[in-house]
Amino acid sequence: MTPNTKPGSRALRRGRHSQKNRIYFITIVTESRRCWFSEHKLARMASSLLDNQGELPGARALCWVVMPDHVHILLELGEMPLHKTINQWKSRSGRILNRTIARKGRFWQKGYHDHALRKEEDIKETARYIIANPLRAGLAKKYGQYPYWNAVWL
């Protein structure tokens, strides 16, 4: 990291590229980590935006969970580059979620965290990690009890 580079800045992403058909573990956080998804209406709306494959341009959500202040998505990338896919989803979902609560302004924090799964990493193990997130956070006591998640294997 150069002296003028801040952690999480664009400079850290320089030289990175996404690969078609690759699986990515994505984390997207709400602006200022506001717990918007503690409200059932917004959590259901975000869930439907993740369930509707047409909302993720050029990609397929294999598994996802909506937590109070962030979402995790296990994403199979299609033709569109990862940054365009995520930015389009964030833009569209942010507009819809803001409209739902009669609010203006940024809904999601800038950027997102991504991890490209390597061949040796187990996709289903990563999916289990994602759907167990509510258990680790104390939002549910057992799998299936938390309502805001889905996986293609069900």
Image (cartoon, grey):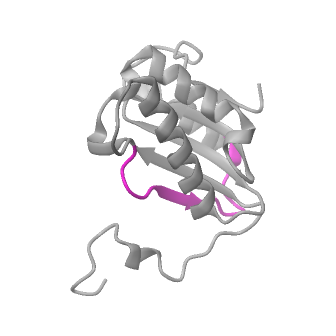
Left or right of 103 on screen, residue 126: right
- Compared with 47, 89 (above or below) is below
Q: Residue at x 45, y 15 (%)?
A: 40
111 drawn magenta: yes
Please give the range of residues in magenta. Answer: 108-124
Q: Residue 139: image x %, image y %?
A: 40, 19
Count of number-bearing discs: 0
Residue under the point 38% across and 26% down: 102
In the rendered structure, the answer to whether residue 125 lies left or right of residue 147 reads: right
In the figure, is residue 58 to the left or right of 68?
right
* Residue occupying image coordinates x 54% and y 50%: 26
In the image, residue 107 lies in the stretch drawn in magenta: no
Residue 61 locus on image (x, y percent): 69, 42
Residue at 36%, 50% (x, y): give it. 109
Q: Quadrant of the C terminus?
A: top right
Which secondary structure dominates the residues rendered in magenta? loop
